[in-house]
Amino acid sequence: MKIALIGASGYVGSALLKEALSRGHHVTALVSRPERIEAQANLAAAKVDVQDSAALAEQLKGFDAVLSAFSGHAQAEQFDYFVKGIRSIIAAAKAAQAPRLLVVGGAGSLEVAPGVQLVDTPEFPEQWKASALGAREALNLLRAETELDWTLLSPSAMLQPGLRTGQFRLGQDQLLVNAAGNSHISVEDYAVAMIDELEKAEHRRSRFTVGY
């Protein structure tokens, strides 16, 4: 497939890039600093300003799918910056008539009990709250969409570098935990689940999650 990958040099985006290329897909990395993208076969890089929706729409034309690994973690005003960026990406994908939009989500909007989301629990770390609330708003915006063929993949509570095992569980709106009560997934296996979804399209117009 021809894929536009927004945020391809980031924490999750770089793993998505590696996984997509390893499966033979053609990827255009849309990043703020394309000079940081190492040249590889089937890979192009272009500078992007996510907040410029009109320019972004032009860049997203002609692809089989758009993957967004856009993150607001580096910004002081994480919530506002992230939500504005997601709104811009959604509008650009619609204007470009992108066949699919796949979005990296957060774990905060997953339920830990009926009607109780992780981000709303007292134990949720304060330093991650703004970005988690932003990611929840991104999910709400996508769920209100009537035009886009979208999918959002939420990771488990802990998303860390590790092994690419290809062995994990999928869920829907509930936080996945293992027998020891831990909720985690490697960035590498998260990327496997996302590119699987790109290829198989089993969670269209919905959110799903991945964990061990």
Image: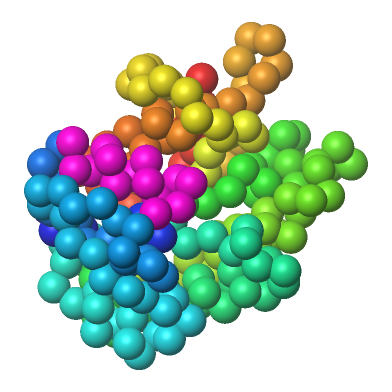
For the point 16% across and 48% down, which residue is it? 40
- Identify which residue, 42 or 151, lies in the foreground: 42
* Depicted 122 relative to depicted 143: above or below: above
For the point 41% across and 70% down, which residue is it? 32
User: Magenta stretch: dominant SS?
Assistant: helix
* Depicted 40 relative to depicted 165: above or below: below
- Identify which residue, 202 or 76, lies in the foreground: 76
Q: Which quadrant of the figure has residue 138?
A: bottom right
Furthest residue toward bottom: 54
Q: Position of residue 7 (x, y in %)?
A: 41, 60
* Depicted 10 relative to depicted 18: above or below: below
Tag count in the figure? 0
Furthest residue toward right: 122
Residue 158 falls left or right of residue 117: left
Furthest residue toward front: 35
For the point 29% across and 47% down, which residue is it? 17
For the point 45% across and 52% down, which residue is it? 10
Residue 145 falls left or right of residue 78: left
Q: Which quadrant of the figure has residue 50?
A: bottom left
Q: Position of residue 124 (x, y in %)?
A: 81, 42
As for residue 198 lying within the magenta part, the answer is: no
The answer to whether one can see residue 162 in this image is yes
As for residue 16 lying within the magenta part, the answer is: yes
Q: Position of residue 48 (x, y in %)?
A: 36, 75
Q: Which quadrant of the figure has residue 98?
A: bottom left
Q: Position of residue 21 (x, y in %)?
A: 19, 43
The answer to whether one can see residue 137 in this image is no
What residue span does the magenta drawing correspond to? 9-22
- Identify which residue, 40 or 187, lies in the foreground: 40
